[in-house]
């Protein structure tokens, strides 16, 4: 499972931030998020396909609004809900300033 390094995302209270991840929902995999609830509020989720062909993958973009100052970690886990081991994990260090 790749985890990548934590990328730092710095925003001010009230600003929006987005993360885009590759996915292929037709395989049963999807992203599960662990959101630092006191810092970020999810405001949207948009999916796009790379083509109109059956089984084509694409991307998902999660949009958040910074709701309180502080620091935390946003984690995205790519998994099939019925399996016990994720295949990918991404993390971001969130810094919300006043």
Image (tube, helix red, strand yellow):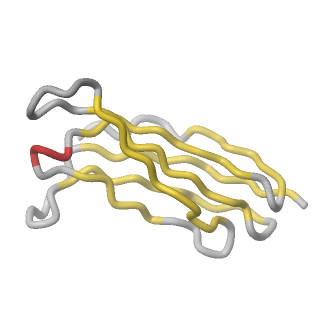
Identify which residue is drawn at 66% across, 75% down. 38
Instruction: Looking at this view, name the residue that lies furthest to the bottom.
Output: 38
The x, y position of residue 17, in whole percent, is: 66, 47
On the image, the x and y values in percent for residue 31 come to: 32, 53
**In the picture, residue 48 is in which quadrant?**
top left
Instruction: Give the position of the C terminus as an image quadrant.
Output: bottom right
Q: Is residue 44 left or right of residue 60?
A: right
Q: Is residue 32 left or right of residue 29?
A: right
Residue at far right of view: 98
Q: Nearer the viewer, residue 65 or 95?
A: 65
Say if 36 sits above or below 26 in the image.
below
Height in image: 43 above or below 54? below
Question: What is the quadrant of residue 55 in the picture?
Answer: top left
Residue in view at x 78 percent, y 70 percent: 68
Residue 96 picture location, percent across and down: 77, 57
At a point 41% along the width and 61% down the height, the residue shown is 33
Q: Is residue 46 left or right of residue 64?
A: left
Quadrant into which the N terminus falls: top left
55, 14: nearer the viewer: 55
């Amino acid at each position: 499972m790749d985890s990548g390094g934590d990328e730092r995302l710095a925003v001010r209270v009230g600003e929006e931030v987005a993360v885009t991840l590759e996915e292929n929902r037709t395989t049963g995999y999807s992203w599960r998020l662990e959101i630092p609830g006191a810092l970020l509020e999810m405001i949207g989720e948009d999916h796009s396909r790379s083509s109109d062909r059956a089984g084509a993958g694409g991307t998902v973009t999660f949009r958040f609004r910074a709701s309180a100052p502080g620091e935390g970690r946003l984690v995205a886990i790519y998994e099939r809900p019925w399996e016990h081991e994720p295949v990918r994990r991404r993390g971001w260090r969130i810094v919300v300033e006043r």
